């Protein structure tokens, strides 16, 4: 079993419902959910002409290989109505692999650690909630978050929203 961290986000329709549905579908596909961060509401990044996002991070375990996990994630996104029309545009669900154990991958279709995670407060704030001991080049998450210009835009939305049974 490999420890993994996954980010989830939604800014279309019943946003919280899409987050919950994504977790349920992942759990039915060999992803053992251990911890789920609070939900944060954030402004969109990149394409600005869209609604606010709800974002959370999940700590889980899986026996799936990284590319197998990516295939499951892409299937879940498709089942939940994700359409890739505008880069960084509105979406029912966005699921990204942040970390997969100590593995580093730099393929055309998969980059682990996620290539922009260390610059995004909407990822690092909830990640810090579930595992503050994660570091990047020896620097703790809390210190990295302090240096991010967009950290003030990450607003707590809901604490205990998803209980793992």
Image (spheres, grey):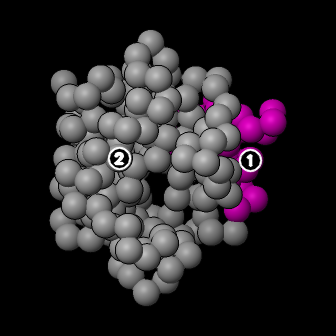
Answer few, some or many: residues within 10 Å of disc 2's Cα (few below 14, many 20 plus, some between 14 and 19): some
Residue 43 visible in image: no
The residue shown at (74%, 47%) is 143
Using residue 69 as the reference point, say whether residue 105 is left or right of it. right
The quarter in which the C terminus is drawn is top left
Q: Nearer the viewer, residue 51 or 77?
A: 77
The residue shown at (65%, 35%) is 105
Using residue 57 as the reference point, say whether residue 74 is left or right of it. left
Residue 71 visible in image: yes
Is 37 one of the magenta-colored residues?
no
User: Image height check: is 29 above or below 46?
Assistant: above
Using residue 150 as the reference point, say whether residue 26 is left or right of it. left
User: Image height check: is 26 above or below 154?
Assistant: above
- Which range of residues does the magenta coloring cover? 127-148
- Residue 148: image location, x then y, percent: 70, 62
Q: Which residue is mark 1?
A: 143
The quarter in which the N terminus is drawn is top left
Disc number placed over residue 74 in the picture, else none? 2
Residue at the limit of the structure toward the front, as seen here: 108
User: What element does badge 2 sit on?
Assistant: helix
Is 141 one of the magenta-colored residues?
yes
User: Image height check: is 95 above or below 129?
Assistant: below
C-alpha distance separating marks 2 and 1: 32 Å
The residue shown at (26%, 71%) is 12
Disc number placed over residue 163 in the picture, else none? none
* CB within 8 Å, label 2 to label 1: no
- Residue 128: image location, x then y, percent: 56, 41
Answer few, some or many: residues within 10 Å of disc 1's Cα (few below 14, many 20 plus, some between 14 and 19): few
Q: Nearer the viewer, residue 126 or 33?
A: 33
User: What element does badge 1 sit on?
Assistant: helix
Using residue 96 as the reference point, say whether residue 111 is left or right of it. right
């Amino acid at each position: 079993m490999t420890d993994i961290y996954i980010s989830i986000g939604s800014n279309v329709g019943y946003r919280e419902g899409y987050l919950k549905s994504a977790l349920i579908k992942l759990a039915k596909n060999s992803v053992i959910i251990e911890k789920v961060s609070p939900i944060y509401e954030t402004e969109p990044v990149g394409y600005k002409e869209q609604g606010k996002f709800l974002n959370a991070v999940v700590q889980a375990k899986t026996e799936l290989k990284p590319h197998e996990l990516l295939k499951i994630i892409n299937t879940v996104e498709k089942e939940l109505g994700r359409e890739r029309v505008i880069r960084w545009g509105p979406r029912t669900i966005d699921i990204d692999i942040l970390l997969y154990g100590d593995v580093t991958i730099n393929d055309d279709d998969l980059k682990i650690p996620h290539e922009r995670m260390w610059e995004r407060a909407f990822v690092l704030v909830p990640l810090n909630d579930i595992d503050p001991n994660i570091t990047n080049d020896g620097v703790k998450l809390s210190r990295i978050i302090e240096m991010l210009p967009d950290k003030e835009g990450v607003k707590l939305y809901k604490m205990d929203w998803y209980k793992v049974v």
